[in-house]
Amino acid sequence: MNCSIAQTLEVLGERWTLLIIRDAFRGVTRFEDFLHTGMSRNVLTERLKRLVEYEVLDKRAIDGKSFDYTLTKKGVQLQPVLLSITHWGDKYMSNPKGLRTIFIERKTGKPIAPMSAYSADGRALKPGEVGLKPGPGSA
């Protein structure tokens, strides 16, 4: 299907995959440490293999039998996606005790603003202000 969303979901559109990427952003790199999510070893093996194949994660040998999985440049560029999903979840799937995770700017320690679309000149756009038109790759 010639659709950016559909093609992206082929790589990322499964719950365990997004949890692996979430953990990679949190600094998890070892196979055994990714298992804390509750997924089975065979599911983790397949998801890691796919993320390496699509160059979202890099697999590096540590010793004869262990590997590190780290985000590639392509993987790091998923940060706004995860932030958006988290902000949406905080708003619509909230915990009665409050926020589960607060994203902060490391330099100031202050919370970041919720994810939003911005115009080319930096203005925040409301959903109704964002449109679409076919690009050259749509045909």
Image: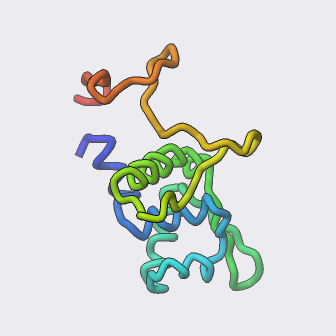
Q: Nearer the viewer, residue 28 or 99?
A: 99
* Residue 62 in the figure: left or right of residue 126: right
Q: Nearer the viewer, residue 118 or 62?
A: 118
* Quadrant containing the C terminus in the rendered view: top left
Q: Position of residue 32 (x, y in %)?
A: 61, 83
Residue lying at 61% horizontally and 43% vertically, measured from the top left: 111
Occupied quadrant, residue 131: top left
State whether residue 10 is above or below residue 45: above
State whether residue 8 is above or below residue 19: above
Q: Residue furthest top?
A: 121
Q: Position of residue 132 (x, y in %)?
A: 27, 25
State whether residue 67 is above or below residue 83: below
Q: Residue furthest front?
A: 97
The coloring applied to the image is rainbow
Q: Nearer the viewer, residue 22 or 98?
A: 98
Residue lying at 54% horizontally and 48% vertically, measured from the top left: 79
State whether residue 106 is above or below residue 55: above
| Res. 2 in view | yes
* Residue 2 in the figure: left or right of residue 111: left
| Res. 135 in view | no
* Residue 57 in the figure: left or right of residue 88: right
Residue lying at 71% horizontally and 73% vertically, measured from the top left: 61
